[in-house]
Amino acid sequence: MTSKIAAFDLGLELGFAVGRETIEECGVEKFVSKEHQGERYTKALGFFTDFLLRHKPDRVAYEAVYHHGGASAAHCYGALEGLLMLACHRLALDLRFVSPAPAPKRGTSKLLVPEIRIISPKALKKYATGNGNADKEMMVDAAIRRWPEFKDQLDLGGGVINDDLADALWVHEAARLGIATEK
């Protein structure tokens, strides 16, 4: 059986996709809050933890971001990346307690953590569109061609597109096929 992969496009409008050979669930979760940043990140940690516990993926993948639009975006991405790692760690600890097998020896709990894959943005764009410098519209258009069943979720009409979902779908595909991943 192929691995179950949870894929994310990290951001305040976080794209997600989960499945094995096909996508079982996908969408966008928004962490935009007028409250303190701590509230935003508390919601994000809750989302990651609930999502991972519900789907129990073998692999978690997300797109690496090497350049940000500013310091605020960099801090946000780093925080979300850290929260995703924390949720993966918590998932491993939870699995240890519900597993019928004896708990692993100290230092081996990493075996229970989902395998984490980081996807190179340039390689992801090249795979999806043939162009390593593809823009958001090109990525969405390619996603609609690859997954026509999600057209209404990707093209919101009136020139509005859902690039966060498109990226999450492509991250899932790249992780599934082993394209441009780093462990």
Image (spheres, rainbow, N blue to C red):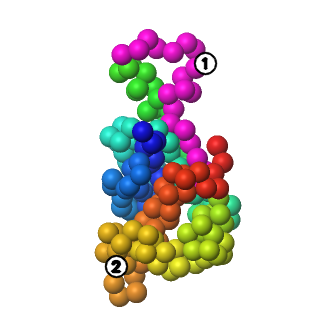
Q: Which residue is mark 2?
A: 156
Residue 94 colored magenta? no
At mark 2, the secondary structure is strand
Q: Earlier in the sequence, mark 1 or mark 2?
A: 1
Q: Residue furthest bottom?
A: 158
Which of the image's four quarters has the N terminus? top left
Residue 34: image location, x then y, percent = 39, 63
Does residue 33 appear to the left or right of 129 in the view shown? Answer: left
Q: Residues within 10 Å of mark 1 (few under 14, many from 20)?
A: few
At mark 1, the secondary structure is loop
Q: Is residue 85 above or below residue 15?
A: above
Residue 94: image location, x then y, percent = 40, 26
C-beta proximity under 8 Å, tags 1 and 2: no
Q: Residues within 10 Å of mark 2 (few under 14, many from 20)?
A: few
Q: Is residue 54 above or below residue 77?
A: above
Residue drawn at point x = 37 percent, y = 78 percent: 155
Residue 110 colored magenta? yes
User: Which quadrant of the view contains residue 72?
Assistant: bottom right
Q: Amino acid at mark 1?
A: Gly
- Spatial CA distance of label 1 from label 2 is 47 Å
Residue 103: image location, x then y, percent = 46, 14
Does residue 176 appear to the left or right of 72 in the view shown? Answer: left
Residue 132: image location, x then y, percent = 66, 72
Q: Which residue is mark 1?
A: 107
What residue span does the magenta drawing correspond to?
Answer: 100-119
Which of the image's four quarters has the C terminus? top right
